[in-house]
Image (cartoon, rainbow, N blue to C red):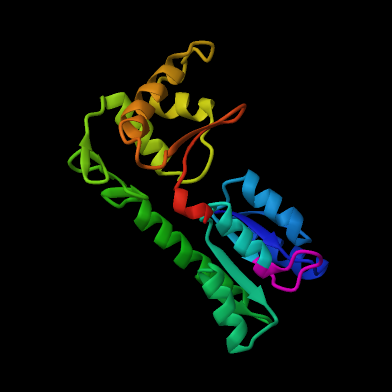
Amino acid sequence: MRLLVIEDEPRLAEFVRQGLAQAGHVADGADNGATGLEMAAATPYDAILLDLMLPGQNGLEVLRNLREFGLATPVIIVSALSGTEHVIRGLDAGAVDYLRKPFAFDELLARLRAVQRKATAAADAPVLRLADLELDLVHRRVARAGQVLALTNREFALLELLLRSPNRVVTKTRIAEKVWEVDFDMGSNVIEVHLSQLRRKLDRAFPSLPPLLETVVGHGYRLHDPAAAR
């Protein structure tokens, strides 16, 4: 797993990062909330370990901002604040788990394995969903607001790729690697043409519904749940 450790106590942060590396994970670190939030928004981490008592922007503020930005990265709060009220606030703000300090490192690894199992199960799910959009992998059926969409095989593959990274930017390079051949000509506009056709069927055919497919100029494309920004 690729992990982000947001912890302002240097020795603890280094201990956790070294332990995660020894367990086969890749761990980046941030020593304040603002930097951690920027890193979480820029990199598709598998999970985030988040302290609550951070300088500047505290952990709860970081977590709320992540969710307001539409980032669904699993967050495990790791904090010395052990009261029940703190646990409730953290979970209500969008954390998937809460680990009290001091903690046994094996317990942290076990909780990360639970997060990984859940992510694997979601990735293997036969139906991918975002807002009112559904993609059935078994029957190769796509529907928005209950209305079936007629997609080509390439459009279906594009939509599946985007749905597997909801609310995250997918670059043109990754689209070329996953949906087209490895030696795809990056100078062509084939990807743009197919995405334009997909947008027409997905968004423009439903003028009364909020658009889901976004172009992030200079970066790529993403499927965005309008409700995630509320």
Q: Please, is residue 54 above or below residue 173 in the view?
A: below
The x, y position of residue 206, in whole percent, is: 32, 36
The residue closer to the viewer here, 201 or 6, is 201
In percent of the image, x 69 and y 66: which residue is there?
Answer: 16
Residue, far left: 139
Q: Is residue 7 left or right of residue 103?
A: right
Q: Is residue 23 visible?
A: no
Q: Please, is residue 161 above or below residue 118 in the view?
A: above
- Quadrant of image for the N terminus: bottom right
The residue closer to the viewer here, 88 or 146, is 146
Q: Please, is residue 212 above or below residue 199 in the view?
A: below
The x, y position of residue 136, in whole percent, is: 24, 44
In which image quadrant can residue 102 be found? bottom right
Q: Is residue 213 left or right of residue 121?
A: right
The x, y position of residue 80, in whole percent, is: 70, 81
Q: Is residue 134 visible?
A: yes
Magenta: main secondary structure: loop
| Range of magenta residues | 50-60
